[in-house]
Image (spheres, grey):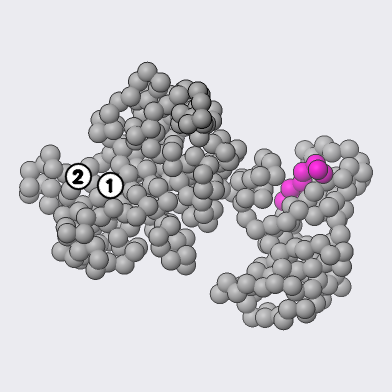
Amino acid sequence: MNTSPPLLSLDHVEIGYPRLDGPGWVPIVRDLTLSLARGSIACLLGPSGCGKSTILRAICGFEALQQGSISLHGKVVSAPEIQVAPNLRKVGMVFQDFALFPHLSVLENVMFGLRALAPAKRREVGLQWLERVSLADKADAYPHELSGGQQQRVALARAMAPEPDLILLDEPFSSLDIDLRERLASEMRDILKANGVTALLVTHDQFEAFAIADHIGVMSEGRIVQWDTPYDLYHEPTNRYVADFIGRGVFVKGRIQANAMVKIELGELQLDNDHHDPLDTEVDVLLRADDIQHDDASPQLAEVVRKTFRGADFLYTLRLPSGQEVLAYVPSHHDHSLGEKIGIRLGVDHVVTFQNK
């Protein structure tokens, strides 16, 4: 049985800034607790201003704590009365803008954090890491000669070359084209996993988070609302905030029926066995875009009111006879016009409901 402590542990962390209009603090991070095992990749996911980047700065040692503690390998490195210097924490950082040195070659950028090694060893290690991120042929190039994705991999190699215990990534895909982000996130996951690197990412983009992370903490107003696997966040959100934030979906009105069923405008859905709402209770049912399926043979019709072309499919916004709008992913060879009525049917595998407001 493995009894070693987590590589990273945050215990009831509180971070804030002094008020300008009087005594006290403006809270930024509130009662935040999480742990990260060696070799795992985690993500803090939330909108701008929720405190996720502040947490990274605190782990690095650039932000003080008002309450709680941060530990690495079971040793406290931050607490209200303890602040281990950033350079003693063995934590690497990949910044949002990559922060590469424009006057240094790719290899020189990667070698920058290896100044304690002999010159020949620095070059050897730098080349090894460029090989690991598939950029050995770009060793003599300069950052401006690389694509955004290549610059990202150089920044990752530079952060990993000193072999830190933990890599922190602050919105590392935000400056890249949206079409590249998910693919590059998958590439980065492969690199991190292949090298056994422990990493914590922050982002506002759920698709990046899903592509890279083993566990995700959805944040709101300085708190982690749910810490879970990507699969469980999507299929078992703990509250409305997570359900609304994760995936593309809408809430529709439903009423609990006998035999653990819920009736909505589009038909009846089977609830899980552990559902305990009383008979005839009004609930809100979460319908995501993949829960509504296009079916030309269905008598249930919905009007196309908006559509977004996504390459392999369209994201349709459909209006039901009641006026309720739902979303549906439809293969792109089904190119329907606005105002057209199309057949749809339910294809829900896991029903998510919340008490009616």
* Alpha carbons under labels 1 and 2: distance apart: 8 Å
Residue 105 position (above or below residue 34): below
Residue 326 sits in quarter: bottom right
The residue sitting at 40% across, 60% down in the picture is 175
Residue 150: where, in percent of width, then height?
A: 30, 63
Is 3 or 64 nearer to us in this picture?
64
* Residue 209 lies in the magenta stretch: no
The residue sitting at 66% across, 44% down in the picture is 241
Please state if 20 lies on the left or on the right of 38 as rendered: right
Please state if 16 lies on the left or on the right of 145 as rendered: right
| Crowd class of label 2 (few under 14; some 14 to 19; many from 20; radius 10 Å) | some
Residue at the limit of the structure toward the front, as seen here:
21
Identify residue for label 2: 113
Identify residue for label 1: 159
* Residue 351 lies in the magenta stretch: yes
Is 195 or 206 nearer to us in this picture?
206
Residue 101: where, in percent of width, then height?
A: 21, 55
Residue 69 position (above or below residue 295): above
Residue 227: where, in percent of width, then height?
A: 56, 38
The residue segment tinted magenta is: 350-357
| Crowd class of label 1 (few under 14; some 14 to 19; many from 20; radius 10 Å) | many
